[in-house]
Image (tube, grey):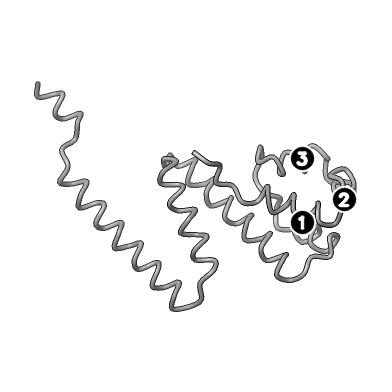
Amino acid sequence: MADLLQFPTALRQARSRRGLMQKTVAEKLNVDPTLLCSAERGARGPLDPKALSKLAAFLDLSPLEAEELNWAARHDRAIGALRRQGLSETELSAISAILSALYGLQGDQQIGLIDYCRQVGQSARMVKSLTPNPLNREART
């Protein structure tokens, strides 16, 4: 399944658009260059909020660019937490798509999408309760 992480791409693009090397950015942020490299590869989680703030200032990101980078970090933290809870890649993919959709919506539109997701969840639970459990079937045979 496709990688769901948003932060590595957002970080790499923000740095590359300014023509800066990872080592230069890492030195300015006072972090180990391998940490920045790992964040850009998705091998570790996003930078912490304090480092993100320093990064945005150093790269002279516009408010919109800084918000997009912060959103990508929040997205990846949420996906990481849900992955650690054992959600499947299919579930994570759906949640990632919903988070991305929510980011582009305003007020009542966000509430409408959240309500719709709740209804889908209730329907899924109802369908699951009506579907025979294959493990129970094996035990009966």
Q: Earlier in the sequence, mark 3 or mark 1?
A: 1
The picture places residue 78, in percent across and down from the top left corner, at 53, 52
**Local crowd at mark 2 within 10 Å, few (<14), some, or many (≥20)?**
few
Q: Earlier in the sequence, mark 2 or mark 3?
A: 2
Describe residue 96's horizontal placement relative to residue 130 as left or right.
right
Identify the residue at image location x=18%, y=46%: 129
Identify the residue at image location x=62%, y=56%: 72
Contact between marks 3 and 1 (CB within 8 A): the answer is no
The amino acid type of the residue labelled 2 equals Leu
Q: Which residue is mark 3?
A: 37
Q: Residue furthest left?
A: 140
Spatial CA span between label 3 and label 1: 14 Å
The amino acid type of the residue labelled 3 equals Cys
Q: Which residue is mark 1?
A: 14
SS at mark 1? Answer: helix
Describe residue 118's horizontal placement relative to residue 29 as left or right.
left
SS at mark 2? Answer: loop
The picture places residue 4, in percent across and down from the top left corner, at 55, 46
Q: Residue furthest bottom?
A: 108
The picture places residue 131, in percent across and down from the top left corner, at 17, 42
Circle nearer the viewer, 2 or 3: 2
Spatial CA span between label 1 and label 2: 9 Å
60 shown above or below 45: below
The amino acid type of the residue labelled 1 equals Ala
Q: Which residue is mark 2?
A: 20
SS at mark 3? Answer: helix
The front one of 32 and 19 is 19
Spatial CA span between label 2 and label 3: 13 Å
